[in-house]
Amino acid sequence: MLLISLVIAGGCNNIKYNAADEAKYQKPTIAVMSFDNRAPVNTRWQLGEGLADQLINRLIQTRRYVVLERQQLNAIMAELKRSESSKFRSEGKPQLGRLKHVRYLVKGTITDFGHAETVEGVWKFFDWGLMGSSSYSIVAATLHVIDIQSGQVIASTNVQTKIRDKKDKEKVTIDNVAFGSYTFYHTTLGQATSKMLEKAVYQIAQAIAECPFQPKIASIINKQVIINGGKDRRIKPGDQYLVRPASHKILDPDSGDILGHITGQILGQIRVVQVTDKYSIAQIIKGNQFAPGQALFKIDSETARGDTEVTPY
């Protein structure tokens, strides 16, 4: 049991991306729904919305995801449509179709939230006495991670935490503490909530596999290739890439599931000559049939000096 706890704790500590990880991996967009509150507790706290907000905050802190709140999308779309009215100026107007596509949806159900009394036996030497009762703060939820593209539930798990209350059996009430506040997280119920959220973030990270960033051609301008990555992806002047067509999906004819991808033949070779924060500019070394969406594969300096084969046209 101790070993399992250490593994989980270590995993939670390692799920945050550093600068190198952010450059190396893609950041999928995920949306978090308000939790369905089915906990047998009466409170004025908006637990479903509150717990979702706290989970969103922790997911953002990992720097692994672009996080959207699905409930806010309707309001955003309504505002975008309203701005299309002739009553509003065109300058600075947001465009429809520019919202990020959500890849994963996170839904949850709160099953326990509060305090539970347990009867102590004579063997409970480290509780509040040889006999009597103790109180525990318990927070539990069922978590679902859904792949929007396939509609499949890729993860379904129960996350829960139990922490023994202080000897004075301090209880948190809505009268003097706001949910998610600094004071809240210094109570046993807040500590149980925090640990439950840590486990939830860890389970989400386990469900959503890390996908390496694949640089692609974003545009062709004045016979120069624009790459969809710059300093943010640690691309440097002098880096060279082979250009291949966008990968072709292999689909199962019965289920429609994606079985894999096949990359096409080499179309050419490019060299980076200028790097900005978000994109890079490259000159064409070989090939001329380039188009946006084609994939780029970095080559080392020794290979770059050689004669790379290019598909003839």
Image: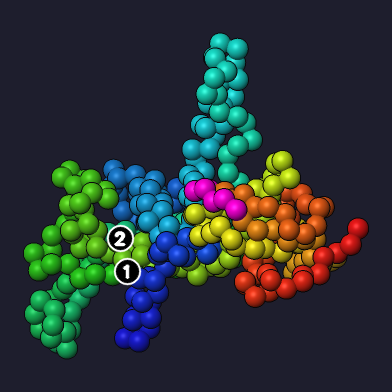
Look at 42% across and 68% down and name the residue there.
15
| Quadrant housing residue 17 | bottom left
The tag earlier along the polypeptide, 2 or 1, is: 1
Q: Is 16 situated left or right of 29 in this image? A: left
Residue 161, label in figure: 1
| Quadrant housing residue 284 | bottom right
Where is residue 134 shown, x and y percent of the image?
A: 17, 72
Q: Is residue 312 in the magenta section? A: no
Q: Is 135 situated left or right of 14 in this image? A: left
Q: Is residue 2 above or below residue 27?
A: below
Q: Is 188 situated left or right of 76 in this image? A: left
The residue lying toward the viewer, choosing from 131 and 194, is 194
* Cβ atoms at labels 2 and 1 below 8 Å apart: yes
Label 2's element?
A: helix
Residue 251 visible to an observer of this rendering: no
Quadrant of the image containing the C terminus: bottom right
Disc 2 target residue: 193
Tell me the kind of residue under disc 1: Thr
Quadrant of the image containing the N terminus: bottom left
Q: Is residue 275 in the magenta section? A: yes
Where is residue 74 shown, x and y percent of the image?
A: 54, 34
The residue lying toward the viewer, choosing from 141 and 236, is 236
Look at 28% across and 70% down and name the residue there.
162
Where is residue 85 shown, x and y percent of the image?
A: 59, 16
Give the extent of the magenta segment: 273-278
Look at 57% across and 18% down and name the residue there.
90
Q: Gap between marks 2 and 1, in whole Å?
A: 7 Å
Q: Residue furthest front?
A: 305
The residue lying toward the viewer, choosing from 303 and 233, is 303
